[in-house]
Amino acid sequence: MISCPEIWTEFFEKYYSEELNKLAFRIMEGGDKRSIYINFTRDLLVFQEGRLGEELLEHPDVVLTHAEQGLARSTNIYGVSLDGCKPRIFSLPATKKVLIRNLRSIHISKFVAIEGIVRKVTEVRPRVVSAAFKCLECGSLSYVSQDESLLRYPNQCACGGKRFVFMPENSISVDSQRVRIQEYPENLRGGEQPQSIDVILEADIAGTVNPGDRIIVNGIVRARPRGIQQRKLTHLDLFVEGNSIEIVQQEYEEFEITEKDKEKILALARSDDIYERVVGTIAPSIYGYEDVKLAIALQLFGGVPKKLPDGTEIRGDIHILLVGDPGVAKSQLLKYVHRIAPRSIYTTGKGTTTAGLTAAAVRDEIDGRWTLEAGALVLADKGIALVDEIDKMRKEDRSALHEALEQQTISVAKAGINAILKARCALLAAANPKYGRFDRYSPIAEQIELSPTLLSRFDLIFVMTDEPNVERDRKLAEHILSIHQLGEIIEKSSSITEDLRQKVEKIEPAIDPDLFRKYIAYAKNINPVLSEEAKKKIGEYYISLRSKAKENSPVPITARQLESLVRLAEASARIRLSEIITAEDVERVTRIMEKSLAQIAVDPETGELDIDFAFAGTSKRQRDRIWTIKKIIEELEETNQHGAPEEEIIKRAESEGIEESKAREILSKLKINGEIFSPKLGFYKIVRKR
Ligand code: ADP
Ligand code: MG
């Protein structure tokens, strides 16, 4: 072994003299960042033919101790002692990276690099490294160094005494944090469960990462027997003692796009039928729903996030909600998108983890420390979150979701934890109607357990109904049956007839999924802008929708929909890899927007477009009726001491064209909402706001 304190001193003085001086200066200034960062690949691997580096990987405990001693002996221009400073090693070669799922016993006590997404962090708390104890007999202090989680006491005092009391104020402790990292979602295929590992971070690297961060941890693999104290098991749990952390940029760099891929992608983008082919790649085994599939394709490519001069941020991610009867392939669609999206997280509203969709701060069962855990939308940062049965989500998620969908952040402030997590993802969600089946005559806000404000955060909402239609049913049956037939034949691998070959082609994705993922990753680098023509067209569409609204009626389309249109048009241009949004892009997306609005925002009583019908859960007509009834009560109140008599209200309402049952329904709604009250049975008064 060549490692010894002297050789490290030589190394530091040769390659890191400037950093030594900076470190010394920080210490003089009273700073608490007492670390020096050593680039493994750039410096350690060239020093002494890389032997010191190799030894570090194999025997990190000894070699890092040498490095620490070598650092303490190194000179600096200020003459400050570097005793107790920590050498931290980063930038290991890719070949030294170990996947979490490949960690084995051979890695124990070795120095490795592990990459993953931070799922949980505990709060930062001191951990005793050298504990002081006072002898109850003679009062003298003795010290015991600590490395396990249970506090170790001295055996016996010099005076022979055996009873001690722990003295925190005389002990030496270090800031410590436990972090759990798990495998990247994009590295999991076919519903594999992600594996995770705990990492201990101490001193100045504790508290530097947040849930959702993608990091490389360089450190020593440790093993700890399961069980506690006297009842330890031979099975070991692995964890990593973190030496340094590197934050990984969140872009789509992991997709290696070769020149050949690039040629294929450019050729695809140029083909005339590219939109059909993209749609034909989204769940070809699911029959129909071309609009939904095109919307999902646009969502995968996404719009362009923008930062305005005043600091406001506008999201580029497109959110889509699928509402509909059971058994219309909503879940299947979501699972399919999970398989082809470059980066995605699939979960259900009920969730499989404590953190649910957003995040949770909970007390750890074992050590009682507060931990902050990332939910699905945080783990899907820079990707797409697929949430089935979103209507069944937890109460905590309901309130956090507004912020997550619009600002794309999740703020947590609880106990010792204060954090703003990033959730820059698109959401594709599915919801079932409350009463089993979807009723197109009621506003959707009344039919699913999602608040109107939450609904308005979705760029597109589609209603998938299962209404009998002979022609469609016949085709659907044929489609599903041939899929099953094909499945059997392919399994038995017997010969395929020409007829079947055609069917296979129909069900095969039009673009190979691997290439499709690269295509999306490539297209994300393109930031299309509106052409003059496209801008004019969006403007015209917006005005045409607004002018459909009559005098006094609510604005049928809001700025929210305008922003959605721009996002969708940007995605449409990205599919062609075009820097410019054309009039055709605008036509394509207004058509989709119309389809969506027609399903949710047309008041079936009048046939008129009414955004409030979709999101506020009340139509214009309904609001008019409510307003009329309140007016009647107000008038009657003036002449009646006990309030407006119920029968009189009903009579006047009828003369205004509101039938009795509707009037009674409105009365009870107003009462439930606290807008009117009943001072005496059968009489009503308006609740006046002070
Ligand atoms: P949901 O989540 O809407 O309740 P599922 O996704 O569980 O419905 O679908 C139920 C089953 O019906 C699935 O096996 C699905 O493949 C099939 N199915 C329903 N509609 C279609 C369709 N249009 N094309 C192909 N399969 C369909
Ligand atoms: Mg389902």
Image (cartoon, rainbow, N blue to C red):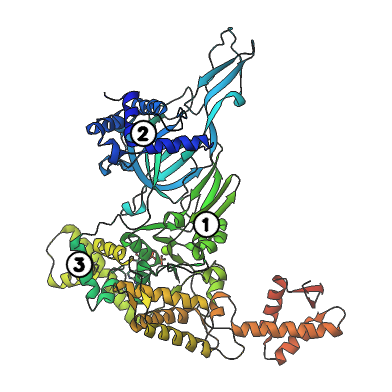
Q: List the residue tagged with mark 3.
A: 264
Q: In the rendered structure, are the residues bearing label 2 and label 1 in contact, judged by CB atoms less than 8 Å apart?
A: no
Work out whether residue 654 or residue 11 is closer to the camera in this orientation and state it.
Answer: 11
* Residue type beneath disc 3: Lys
Residue 187 placement (x, y as % from top left): 31, 52
Position of 210 with respect to 532 (left or right) is right
* Residue type beneath disc 2: Val
Q: Could you say which quadrant of the image residue 501 lies in?
A: bottom left
Residue 638 placement (x, y as % from top left): 84, 84
Between the C-alphas of marks 2 and 1, the distance is 32 Å
Q: Secondary structure at mark 2?
A: strand
Q: List the residue tagged with mark 1.
A: 410
Q: List the residue tagged with mark 2.
A: 221
Is tag 2's residue or tag 3's residue first in the polypeptide sequence?
Answer: 2
Q: Is residue 465 visible?
A: no
Q: Does the residue tagged 1 have its C-beta within 8 Å of any atom of ligand 2?
A: no
**Quarter of the figure with the C terminus:** bottom right
Residue 622 placement (x, y as % from top left): 62, 82
- Mark 3, Cα crowd under 10 Å, few <14 / some 14-19 / many 20+, is some
Between the C-alphas of marks 2 and 3, the distance is 43 Å
Is tag 3's residue or tag 1's residue first in the polypeptide sequence?
Answer: 3
At 52% from the left and 81% from the top, the residue drawn is 557
Task: Name above or below for residue 236 compared with residue 136.
Answer: below
At 64% from the left and 10% from the top, the residue drawn is 138
Task: State the mark number for residue 627.
Answer: none
Work out whether residue 628 or residue 642 is closer to the camera in this orientation and state it.
Answer: 628
Q: Secondary structure at mark 1?
A: strand
Task: Name above or below for residue 96 compared with residue 82.
Answer: below
Q: Could you say which quadrant of the image residue 123 lies in?
A: top right
